Amino acid sequence: MRILLPWLAAAVIAQATTLSVVPIHEPISMRATDVDDLLDESEEALQATVMPRPMALSGAFPETLVEAIATPHQLPTNDPHYVVEEVNLLILCHVKVAAEMKDDGLYVTLDVGGLEIPEDVDLTSRQLVRLAMLAVRRTLEDYQRPQTESLKVRLLVAGTSLETESLKDLATEYVLKGS
């Protein structure tokens, strides 16, 4: 009986969860392809971009949306010679994303404590963080479009070391208007 009660409680909670298919924007590496993108405001071509993909998500929104930008992603392909196991730059470079809704808005933290850019990824840590922040913003803009109230967003950079301390100056905040 002791085992049955927790199992039944978990089953009821699982059935009460709402599952939504939503667009998530991710910072994507385009290494091993013949494509560059002009995302950088300096008009520098990067072998990276921010692209949407659909995901089926459950949990607290918008926090779950933001954290989903750091999920594994293998690009589907029809080319048998394109074998890249992971394209999400946050996974490749060991950057963690956390989001928490507080009374005064959504706090998003990019934790760069484990940051390590692979040799075959031609980006600086600053470019990577800027791409991650763009992915957060685009994901939240899609989410916010049908909402009736505005959303204040604070993006923070944590886990810096002496080498990455300057990334903290990328921290920003903005308000996304509702409809």
Image: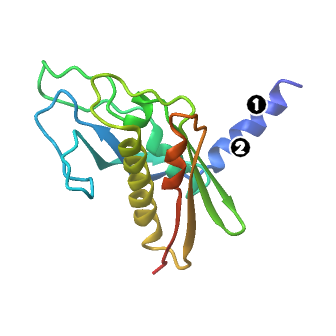
Tell me the quadrant of the picture where the C terminus can be found. Answer: bottom left
The percent position of residue 101, horizontal first and vertical second, equals: 66, 59
The percent position of residue 87, horizontal first and vertical second, equals: 32, 32
Q: Earlier in the sequence, mark 1 or mark 2?
A: 1
Left or right: where 40 falls relative to 118: left
Display colour scheme:
rainbow
The percent position of residue 169, horizontal first and vertical second, equals: 51, 54
The residue positioned 22% from the left and 20% from the top of the image is: 83
Residue at label 2? 12
Q: CA distance from mark 1 to mark 2?
A: 9 Å
Left or right: where 22 falls relative to 169: left
The residue positioned 13% from the left and 19% from the top of the image is: 80
The three-letter code of the residue at mark 2 reads Val
Residue 172 vs residue 98, the one in the foreground = 172
Observer able to see residue 22: no
Residue at label 1? 7
* Element carrying mark 1: helix
